[in-house]
């Protein structure tokens, strides 16, 4: 038995990169994006090829297997293992050189594909293959899987675009595989020479044959290309440390033709007929995977056909020729790049969207990417549908129709013994069906654990035995990724769900989308790793902490993996008390970006609140939880005692401020925000309300507007009334005594009533003080019963509070129907004007805008009404995405300042610095405005403040009513 301490010590003495055998590092690499889970001994992040060789030498000494790993997005289980994982994303992630004249690049295996594309783009070049995970998959992983992507009909697979590799063999030999037997290990040529007939006849001829070893690439008539034969070998033959890849000219202009068909079979049968027109893509998907409201032509299934040209007109003309040649129900040709990206995002997100059936049932990979000859795709799909029906299964095919490659996630029951048995029977029958159509069990993602056991059905026992002989030549000690491709374990073992608890975990939130099951909520993360994207464009938010640190444990996926292992109890053994999970969640900003940007809707902010609630149950909490988590209580006390002035004065004395911050767990670098001299509600009570009979709206006096930014509330009142609306505030009398349910209106209830304020509970929820949050929200519902009895909407100015009321409140008070009624009433400032003052025209501001859409606005509330309101006021331009980094209490907490500032530097601060001098800096959230003030000395304004100022600047300050 291996002595893990000796192995760890040996690796640390031999390797200059990191060697991590901690529970966290192991937990983060137990799974990829497949159905499988295997627990490694440790993780090594090599710095260079010498480190790789040293790690292989130590592991060979101890008989410990090695698994090379890139982005961990493999769908067949080949990026998991029980030995040492080599993580290439930390150090060996560079573009070493790019030669525009030769159209080549030299890359390290951990380089993310998008980084190569960005470097090649200024030269008019690109790497041809582009999987939907292009923003986080690595070149090494693409070589290991022979990845393809949507443009393979034009530019082929990764194997078609690799010129030469640098490889370290399991016994430490350095080879440079390439054409004409370059870099072949001893004995390989002799083996091939003895099997020429088998290699010429035993391999299906189709564009997406990824299954097995590509030994036919070693045929003399195919150039005896050793590098090409290694592509798709899933890290089982040698470790790639460098690659010379070909680049292709990128079209200067592109057009996207979206062709609509009645159903997927019609789209599939049409796809092959479009190939003579030489399109760049022929992608297909059906209506089941398309979000409601998507801007697609009418139909039940679509082909996304991209064309290129030197000019927009040339690309459009080619797309229109394809439309004319296709027999379609309807069609759309798009040349605007932004609109094309929006449409492509629908297709790229399908890998996550497909993990849930329309009724919410979970669906899983395993038969994710079979491929057949394109001309047989329609017939294959019909047979495939029939087979699913026979087994009582459901799934929605989509994918690379032009290459005959279909992706599908099927609603397998992988939790019970009968369900797993059906999974095996279906897998065996489907393998036979694919082979009967002349296809490949894998058309993109490799065999891994999911299909390798069934390769004899495709290739026959003799060819599979040949694969084993090739493996023995490259890796005689069976060191690299054993159990993949050759001598595999059964496809129905090591399933990642088997370790999860069989009974629902006792939790506080309702998890309505997961039937109240916290395990099911955690299972949502299937590992597609969109959260590992290192740069975001447009309004996207997820995942700011990963972009700031680059660490897997600070990604949404990493945190979900740790929660999975917490529930499993094998690696993370302390349950809710786990320090590993606590530390990973510590840098989660609760921005809720994953709730919208994650294709499967992982909601890490809610999981974090749930975890903190249990973690600190009956224990002393961090000081910041008391200081900022209970902020509404402290500020209400200040307001009642009218002590804002003295508090501000004391906070301005530096020694006192330092002591207060130290006591409250607040970062020393932060300034304590000044309290308003007059609260918003005090101003409200003293104003002379104008007469009016317009639609009644109830303005929510959130904690931040009430105590810290009352100018926002005053501005909102000004604008709402100018739009003809009648503004009221929520009640402040809560019935007391035995009639505290606020359902009785007896004289006793009025005599025993207590004055209170509404509160959404945001600060309590974000710090996991869920019992307090439930109490606060219940009190709020009691106060609001008179409002809920009317049709009046609740206008919430602070996006974080609006998002909390709309989502967290009904999920936390899932046993109180009033919470759902309240959530349905919540409107943002812009939504209120659009719905209840549709004929009002805002005053002209006519200036550019800069700033950032609040992360909760993006994730929960939606931005379209705000965009329309800004446009109507002449506020031009778009706001940045991402998260400001302050995120309520997060950026104030001790130890978070640097990460908070890094998040702001991701998008917000560059957008403000690069904006023209006359730009209006918009920031609807108090946190966003505070961050701008602290880090840039810039005053951000709520949209209500901008519009109110414009009203007051008008010559007559008249209402704009039409």
Image (spheres, rainbow, N blue to C red):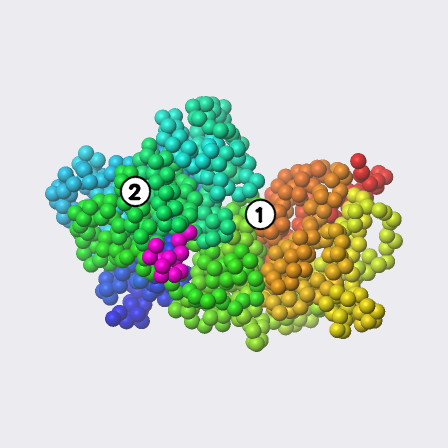
- Placement of 295 over or under 772, stated as above or below: above
Q: Residues within 10 Å of mark 2 (few under 14, many from 20)?
A: many
Mark nearer the N terminus (1 vs 2): 2
| Label 2 sits on residue | 434
Front in this rendered view, residue 65 or 790: 790
Residue furthest front as drawn: 390
Q: Residue at x 22, y 40 (%)?
A: 203
User: Where residue 563 sits in the image (x, y, percent)?
Assistant: 46, 63
Q: What kind of element bears circle 2?
A: helix
The answer to whether marks 1 and 2 mark residues whose Cβ atoms lie closer than 8 Å is: no
| Label 1 sits on residue | 881
Q: Which residues are magenta?
A: 409-422
User: Where residue 66 sits in the image (x, y, percent)?
Assistant: 29, 59
**Residue 208 falls in which quadrant of the image?**
top left
Q: Residues within 10 Å of mark 1 (few under 14, many from 20)?
A: many
Give how far apart the Cα atoms at labels 1 and 2 are: 44 Å
Front in this rendered view, residue 191 or 587: 191
Q: Residue at x 16, y 41 (%)?
A: 198
Front in this rendered view, residue 252 or 83: 83
Q: What kind of element bears circle 1?
A: loop
Q: Is residue 448 left or right of residue 221?
A: right
Residue 602 visible to an observer of this rendering: yes
Position of the C terminus by quadrant: top right
Q: Is residue 853 left or right of residue 181?
A: right
Position of the N terminus by quadrant: bottom left
């Amino acid at each position: 038995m291996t002595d893990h301490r000796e192995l760890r010590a040996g690796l640390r003495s031999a390797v200059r990169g990191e060697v991590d055998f901690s529970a966290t590092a192991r937990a983060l690499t137990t799974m990829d994006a497949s159905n499988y889970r295997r627990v490694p001994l440790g993780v090594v992040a090599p710095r260079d090829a010498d480190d790789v060789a040293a790690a292989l030498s130590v592991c060979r000494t101890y008989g410990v297997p090695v698994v090379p790993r890139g982005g961990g997005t493999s769908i067949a289980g080949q990026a998991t293992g029980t030995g040492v994982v080599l993580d290439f994303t930390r150090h060996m992630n560079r573009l070493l050189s790019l030669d525009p004249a030769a159209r080549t690049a030299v890359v390290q295996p951990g380089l993310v594909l998008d980084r190569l594309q960005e470097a090649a783009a200024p030269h008019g070049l690109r790497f041809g293959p582009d999987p939907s995970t292009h923003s986080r998959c690595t070149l090494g992983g693409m070589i290991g899987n022979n990845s393809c992507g949507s443009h393979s009909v034009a530019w082929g697979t990764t194997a078609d675009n690799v010129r030469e590799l640098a490889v370290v063999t399991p016994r430490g030999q350095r080879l440079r595989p390439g054409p004409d037997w370059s870099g072949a290990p001893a004995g390989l040529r002799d083996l091939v020479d003895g099997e020429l007939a088998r290699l010429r006849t035993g391999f299906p001829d189709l564009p997406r044959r990824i299954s097995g070893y590509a030994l036919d690439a070693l045929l003399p008539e195919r150039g005896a290309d050793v590098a090409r034969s290694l592509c798709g070998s899933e890290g089982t033959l040698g470790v790639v440390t460098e690659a010379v890849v070909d680049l292709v000219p990128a079209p200067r202009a592109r057009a996207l033709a979206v062709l609509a068909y009645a159903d997927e079979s019609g789209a599939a049968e049409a796809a092959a007929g479009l190939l003579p027109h030489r399109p760049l893509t022929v992608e297909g998907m059906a209506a089941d995977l398309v979000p409601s409201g998507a801007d697609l032509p009418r139909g039940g299934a679509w082909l996304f056909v991209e064309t290129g040209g030197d000019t927009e007109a040339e690309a459009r003309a080619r797309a229109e020729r394809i439309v004319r040649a296709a027999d379609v129900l309807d069609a759309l040709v798009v040349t605007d790049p932004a609109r094309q990206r929006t449409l492509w995002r629908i297709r790229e997100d399908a890998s996550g969207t497909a993990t849930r059936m329309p009724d919410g049932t979970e669906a899983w990979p395993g038969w994710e990417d079979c491929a057949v000859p394109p001309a047989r795709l329609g017939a294959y799909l019909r047979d495939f549908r029939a087979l699913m029906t026979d087994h009582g299964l459901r799934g929605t095919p989509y994918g690379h129709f032009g290459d005959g490659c279909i992706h599908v996630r099927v609603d397998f029951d992988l939790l019970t013994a009968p369900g797993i048995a059906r999974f095996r029977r279906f897998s065996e029958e489907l393998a036979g069906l694919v082979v009967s159509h002349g296809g490949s069990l894998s058309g993109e993602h490799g065999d891994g654990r999911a299909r390798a056991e069934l390769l004899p059905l495709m290739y026959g026992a003799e060819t599979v035995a040949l694969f084993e002989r090739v493996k023995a030549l490259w890796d005689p000690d069976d060191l690299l990724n054993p159990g993949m491709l050759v001598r595999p374990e059964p496809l129905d073992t090591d399933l990642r769900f088997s370790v999860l608890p069989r009974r629902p975990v006792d939790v506080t939130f309702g998890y309505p989308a997961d039937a109240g099951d916290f395990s099911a909520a955690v299972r949502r993360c299937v590992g597609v790793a969109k959260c590992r994207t290192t740069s975001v464009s447009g309004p996207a938010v997820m995942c700011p902490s990963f972009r700031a640190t680059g660490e897997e444990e600070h990604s949404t996926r990493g945190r979900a993996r740790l929660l999975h292992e917490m529930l499993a109890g094998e690696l993370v053994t302390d349950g809710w008390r786990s320090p590993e999970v606590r530390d990973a969640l510590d840098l989660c900003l609760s921005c809720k970006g994953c709730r919208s940007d994650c294709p499967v809707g992982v909601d890490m902010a809610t999981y974090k609140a749930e975890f903190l609630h249990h973690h600190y149950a009956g224990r002393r909490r961090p000081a910041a939880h008391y200081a900022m988590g209970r902020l509404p209580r402290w500020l209400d006390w200040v307001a009642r005692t009218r002590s804002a002035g003295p508090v501000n004065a004391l906070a301005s004395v530096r020694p006192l401020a330092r002591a207060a911050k130290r006591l409250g767990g607040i970062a020393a670098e932060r300034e304590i925000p000044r309290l308003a001299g007059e609260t918003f509600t005090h101003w409200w009570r003293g104003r002379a309300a104008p007469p009016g009979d317009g639609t009644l709206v109830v303005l929510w006096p959130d904690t931040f507007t009430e105590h810290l930014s009352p100018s926002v509330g005053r501005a909102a009142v000004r604008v709402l009334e100018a739009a003809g609306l009648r503004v009221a505030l929520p009640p402040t009398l809560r019935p007391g005594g035995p009639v505290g349910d606020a359902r009785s209106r007896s004289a006793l209830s009025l005599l025993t009533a207590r004055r209170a304020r509404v509160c959404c509970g945001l600060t309590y929820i974000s710090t996991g003080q869920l019992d307090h949050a439930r109490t606060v929200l219940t009190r709020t519902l009691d106060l609001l019963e008179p409002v809920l009895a009317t049709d009046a909407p609740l206008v919430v100015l602070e996006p974080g509070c609006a998002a909390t009321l709309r989502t967290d409140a009904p999920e936390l008070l899932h046993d109180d129907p009033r919470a759902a009624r309240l959530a349905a009433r919540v409107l943002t400032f812009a939504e209120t004007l659009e719905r209840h003052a549709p004929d009002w025209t805002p005053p002209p501001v006519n200036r550019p805008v800069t700033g950032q859409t609040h992360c909760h606005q993006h994730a929960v509330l939606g931005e379209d009404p705000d965009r329309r309101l800004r446009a109507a006021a002449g506020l031009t331009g778009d706001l940045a995405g991402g998260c400001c980094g302050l995120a309520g209490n997060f950026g104030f907490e001790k130890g978070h300042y640097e990460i908070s500032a890094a998040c702001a530097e991701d998008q917000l601060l560059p957008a403000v610095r690069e904006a023209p001098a006359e730009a209006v800096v918009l920031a609807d959230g108090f946190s966003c405005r505070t961050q701008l003030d602290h880090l840039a000395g810039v005053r951000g304004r709520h949209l209500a403040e901008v519009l109110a100022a414009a009203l007051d600047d008008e010559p007559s300050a008249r209402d704009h009513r039409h």
